[in-house]
Image (tube, helix red, strand yellow):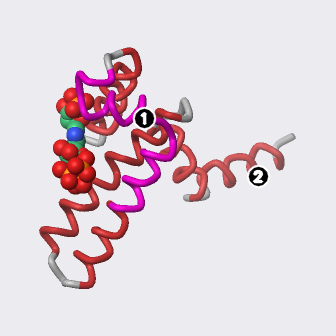
Amino acid sequence: MTDINILRRLAETIEARKSADANSSYVAKLLHGGQDKILKKIAEESAETLMASKDGNTDQVVYETADLWFHCLILLAHHGLTPDDVLRELERREGVSGIVEKASRKSD
Ligand SMILES: N=c1c2ncn([C@@H]3O[C@H](COP(=O)(O)OP(=O)(O)OP(=O)(O)O)[C@@H](O)[C@H]3O)c2ncn1[C@@H]1O[C@H](COP(=O)(O)O)[C@@H](O)[C@H]1O
């Protein structure tokens, strides 16, 4: 099993790039470039993921999805959000919090 904390570590690196010089790294350049530059990369990486899937190239699907997730982390950082915000939303959808809420309402 791989370590999901890679998302948190990468998000911390991205956060640190906010105060770095724009020319010092790829992430710093993108963050300083603003929302439209980040959204453009996400559109590109989405299209590349789609093409890899249509080609049936599973190695490429993994590679392009990694690019897509990476750029989504940069977008989250742009909005002051973290991967945990998204993970919480996925957990909420799993229904766990809904079931716990219903149970606690019944016991009131
Ligand atoms: N995970 C990544 C990562 N994935 C993809 N990329 C970059 O994202 C870009 C992907 O764009 P494309 O596929 O379009 O490739 P490209 O045509 O070369 O890029 P452009 O010319 O379009 O910018 C490439 O420049 C990749 O190098 C990444 N760059 C950085 N990281 C991580 O981010 C950390 C911080 O990076 P820096 O800010 O560069 O130090 C690194 O330590 C890595 O862990």
| Residue 12 at x, y percent in the picture | 35, 25
Residue at figure coordinates x 53%, y 39% from the top left = 85
Question: Could you tell me which secondary element the residue under label 1 belongs to?
Answer: helix
CA–CA distance between discs 1 and 2? 45 Å
* The quadrant where residue 10 appears: top left
Q: Given the image, on which type of amino acid does mark 1 rest?
A: Gly
Which residue, given by chain and number where applicable, does mark 1 sit on? 33
> Can you tell which of label 1 and label 2 is closer to the viewer?
1
Q: Is residue 64 magenta?
A: no
Relative to residue 103, is residue 61 drawn left or right?
A: left
Q: Given the image, on which type of amino acid does mark 2 rest?
A: Lys
Q: Nearer the viewer, residue 103 or 91?
A: 91
Residue at figure coordinates x 49%, y 39% from the top left = 76
Which residue, given by chain and number where applicable, does mark 2 sit on? 102
Residue 4: mark: none
The region drawn magenta spans 22-44
* The quadrant where residue 46 appears: bottom left
| Residue 74 at x, y percent in the picture | 40, 39
